[in-house]
Image (spheres, rainbow, N blue to C red):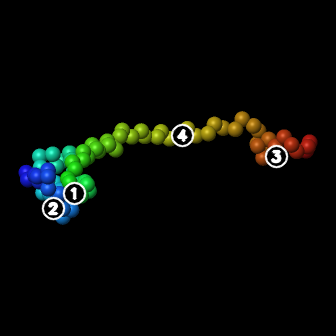
Amino acid sequence: MTTEPADQAMSEERARELCAQLAATHADRSTHQWLPRRAGEGWQVMKVAIPPPEDVLQASQQAEPSPSPADDPRTAHDQNVGPWVGPV
């Protein structure tokens, strides 16, 4: 791994090159990423942890079919005409 001297300001281009190199070769490349950032008069490379993926697979619950509606206890006349009709 190459490092830049602390007393020299790194250019943005060099910081991006170093980020690409670290992303390809560093042992932590599966858990971290490297990004360039402005620091004072130059640029530096910062190491950022990648959050672990969320477990999006969950147990599913199967919906059971709803029961058929119960039979209407009213007479056919009450079902069709209703109680609001006068005497027939």
Q: Earlier in the sequence, mark 3 or mark 1?
A: 1
Q: Which residue is mark 1?
A: 43
Quarter of the rendering containing residue 70: top right
- Residue 87 at what x, y percent from top left? 92, 42
Circle 2 SS class: helix
- Residue 41 at what x, y percent from top left? 24, 58
The disc at residue 65 is none
Q: Which residue is mark 4?
A: 66
Can residue 25 be seen?
no
Q: Amino acid at mark 1?
A: Trp
Circle 1 SS class: strand
Q: Earlier in the sequence, mark 2 or mark 1?
A: 2
Q: Nearer the viewer, residue 25 or 10?
A: 10
Q: Which residue is mark 2?
A: 14
Q: CA distance from mark 2 to mark 3?
A: 88 Å
Side of 54 relative to 68 (left or right): left
**Image depth: mark 1 or mark 4 in front:** 1
Relative vertical location of residue 18 with respect to residue 28 in this rendering, above or below: below
Residues at discs 2 and 1 in contact (Cβ within 8 Å): yes
The quarter of the picture where the C terminus appears is top right
